[in-house]
Image (spheres, helix red, strand yellow):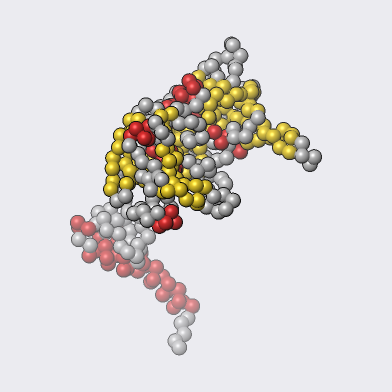
Amino acid sequence: MRLYSRNQVIGIVLVAISLTSLGVVAAQKFAPNGFSAFVGHKAAARAETLPSDEGSALPEDSSFALQTNAPQAVLVSDPTTGYTQDEAQNISVYSNTNEAVVNITTETVGVNWFLEPVPQEGGSGSGSIIDTRGYVVTNRHVIADAVKIYVSLSDGSQYEGKIIGIDAENDIAVLKFDPPANMALKTIPFGDSSSLKVGQKVLAIGNPFGLERTLTTGIVSALGRPIKTETGTIIKDMIQTDTAINPGNSGGPLLDTQGRMIGINTMIYSTSGSSAGIGFSIPVNTAKRVVSELIQYGKVRRGSIDAELFQLNSSIATYARLSTDKGLLVSRVQKGSNAEKAGIKGGTDGVRYGSSRNSTVIYLGGDVITSIGGVATDTLADYYSALESRKPGETVEVTVLRGKQQISLKLTLSEREN
């Protein structure tokens, strides 16, 4: 092992520093197209050998960032307010609409230890004032089982509301409260949900967790979602959004950037009970049709087929030797009904189906309805969905399976009994 004196060590260090300095100078001199420095001899050598048209290539062992002329996102702000365009938009929508969003609380009836009925606190949600006379649209499930309904306004005042009409199939309810004669209510205008695009910005205002008039923003994540509700009905064409919709937001408005209602916030998909980034809203075009009829008739008038229908399954299909196990078996057809006039055939062979306590008699040998108006009817839920927007007196095409033959029939709908 060779030993060095103190002076020799100092000399070696000085020489090393000098050589390093020369390497950096060489790299700066020969680096192409604006690469200012490659530290170390290996980097300097690579810089010298790069062709002139490859000056934008970054060596694999370099930690320097590329310098590009790609356009950068710039947030433009209003010099008079200091808000960005997006912030100003959010502020404007909230300012113009928040006073038209109400908090809805309910009172239900419970039973005490002595089995006596007692009032108790129910659920809560949101709603939108849609008419200066005090009409409010919300979700049906917000006021479910309520014996009393209270509508709270942005100024803190509270009024008792009454139910004008309920549509369980779309989870929509219309309420009314009576404001003082001198009160000018703010309302939220209806927009158009048919022109929505995935990626479009949307905003939601509601009362999540009892925190009044909370604004959240997001985008339309998907369109045309068929969603099954807790009651088993299917709401068609639901709007999916990543806007935060938490408990208490139900019934509140989903808004576009112009402050127009384009949906009614209804439910979330969550494993924890809080917002999980997937919310669903009833499209406002559905709400417009439903709300109009609820105010006018107190119910939604829908078409119906006057026949006893039974949903097929594999057991029935096997027993009846049917060629399909999906569809609606026509068990009985009422005499003089629209089904009989259209030529739909009912069954003739009565059999008992189900357990002894819950059995029912169905008649085999009749037609199997496979579609209505071009919509497949594999289940009873499909049947109600196919006729959800159909009115009494409207003529629809009904496709039935008779034996192994498919037949198309024209049928004029009657009014469904709610």
Compared to residue 360, the image places residue 299 above or below, namely above
What residue sits 31% from the left and 41% below the top? 399
Q: Estimate the x, y position of residue 6 in percent, counting from the top left.
A: 49, 78
Single out the residue that lies furthest toward the right: 114
243 or 42: nearer the viewer:
243
Choose top left, top right, bottom left or bottom right for residue 42: bottom left
Residue situated in front as seen by the camera: 320 or 297? 320
Front-most of 198 and 235?
Answer: 235
**Residue farthest toward the top in the current orientation of the protein:** 182
The total number of labels drawn is 0
Q: What quarter of the picture does the N terminus occupy?
A: bottom left
Where residue 299 sits in the image (x, y, percent)? 50, 26
Q: Position of residue 127 (x, y in %)?
A: 54, 29
Q: Which residue is at 48% across, 33% downward?
A: 264
| Residue 247, image quadrant | top right
Q: Residue at x 22, y 65 (%)?
A: 49
Image coordinates of residue 85 in percent, x first then y, are 41, 31
Please, is residue 39 above or below residue 77 in the view?
below
Of 407 and 79, the residue lying toward us: 407
Single out the residue that lies furthest toward the bottom.
Answer: 1
The residue under the point 37% across, 26% down is 393
Is residue 409 visible to the viewer in this orientation of the structure?
A: yes
Is residue 24 in view? no
In the picture, measured across the screen, residue 114 lies left or right of residue 309, that is right
